[in-house]
Amino acid sequence: MTAPELSIPQGWDEITAAWMTSALAQHFPGAEVDTVRVALRDDGTNRRARLALTYRTGTGPATVFAKAVDPDHADLVALTSGLYHEPRLFSSAVTLPLDHPAVYAAIIDEDRRDFLMIMEDVVSRGADPRDSTRPMTVEQAGAGVEGLARLHSEYWGDRLTRNPVLDWVEPFVAFQGLEYAPLHIAHERLGDTVPAEIIGLSGTELFVDIWARYIGTLTASSPSPPTLLHGDPHIGNTYVLPADAGGEHVGFLDWQMVRRGNFSLDLGYFLQGALTIEDRRRAERDLLEQYRNALRLPEAEMPTTQDIWLGYRASVAHGLAIWMATLSGGDAWQRADICLAFAQRYAAAFVDLQTPQALDAVCG
């Protein structure tokens, strides 16, 4: 999957037809690219582009998606996500038993502090990328939790720690910086749309006493051992495939925060943000049971229903802290409507699920 003979172009316009031909060669033998055109740029904390391709000979994808480091955000990405986690994951050629974009080339240049990935444009096979303003149905969320269960089962406990090609995967630990978020901005934007308990939380309470405390539980070996985490499976990193693709499947994008840790982070962060508040309240117990039933583990390793429920309740700490901090940043990282929808959903879950009490129970 890697293309070690390829150097990383300085910009999208420097990706030539010959370079792209080499990048696609392993997956599309005989395809010779004729032209490469930047069809769309969507830069954020990373540089991203959709590239349109034509071919001189052979066949290949009409579009691909490219992702590389944005030098202006490299320090932030290194602090919170890890610069090279996603390309390392896809260079390792491990099986990820859930839908994700195919990766055609993953190149790392540590001397330049850069990487470049050329991957499938999932929209070309009918995928519908989602964000918090377009929540999932309960059925779609169920497909998502089943995919996460398959991923977690594959690398549960020593299936991950004894896998030599994944020995670089870091534990999920609390990163620094959230405590400096100007939380008053989030409070002003939320107004009375969230419970008063949320507005009453200080930065120290939310980011240290609640969030960092929860994150500190993720690498404990009991009651469930760490597994391979997507690490950032909010709805904005997902897509829904059409029913005629073989069932209404949910896929996961953006694996930059891949980590090892307790399953509850992926499960809660995805589910609590993917559904409306009403649908989450109505269906979450059933969806957690759907997750448990989808785990492919020996009975002796299966987490109990009670353990899943407790970890799920505690996990709201992560979603609430991340999106309160993001909302506090204005429009620098995400659109305000996206941030508001997330903050409102995690805030409601925090109160509904009595997250501080759950965290006390998890911590013993």
Image (cartoon, rainbow, N blue to C red):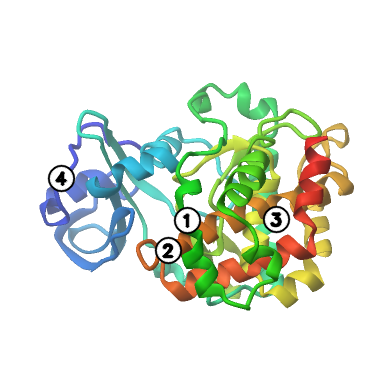
Q: Secondary structure at mark 4?
A: loop
Percent coordinates x, y for residue 177 in the rendering = 45, 44
Residue 131 appears in the picture as rendered? no
Q: Which picture quadrant has residue 132?
A: bottom right
Circles 2 and 1 in contact, beta carbons < 8 Å: yes
Q: Whole-Å distance between the Cαs marked 2 and 4?
A: 23 Å
**According to the image, label 4 marks what residue?**
9
- Crowd around label 2: few <14 · some 14–19 · many ≥20 (10 Å): many
Q: Whole-Å distance between the Cαs marked 3 and 2?
A: 20 Å
- Ranked by sequence position, the earlier of labels 2 and 1 is 2
Q: Whole-Å distance between the Cαs marked 3 and 1?
A: 16 Å
- What's the amino acid at mark 1? Leu
- Ranked by sequence position, the earlier of labels 3 and 2 is 2
Side (left or right) of 217 relative to 343: right
Q: Going 62% across and 73% down the picture, which residue do you hit?
A: 136
Q: Whole-Å distance between the Cαs marked 3 and 4?
A: 38 Å
- Ranked by sequence position, the earlier of labels 1 and 4 is 4
Q: Is residue 197 above or below residue 291?
A: below
Q: Going 46% across and 35% down the picture, which residue do you hit?
A: 93
- Ranked by sequence position, the earlier of labels 2 and 4 is 4
Q: In the rendered view of the protein, which quadrant contains the N terminus? A: top left
**According to the image, label 3 marks what residue?**
146
**According to the image, label 1 marks what residue?**
253
Label drawn at residue 122:
2
Give 291 or 333, whichever is nearer the viewer.
Answer: 333
Q: Which picture quadrant has residue 320?
A: bottom right
Q: Going 32% across and 40% down the picture, which residue do you hit?
A: 75
Q: Whole-Å distance between the Cαs marked 2 and 1?
A: 9 Å
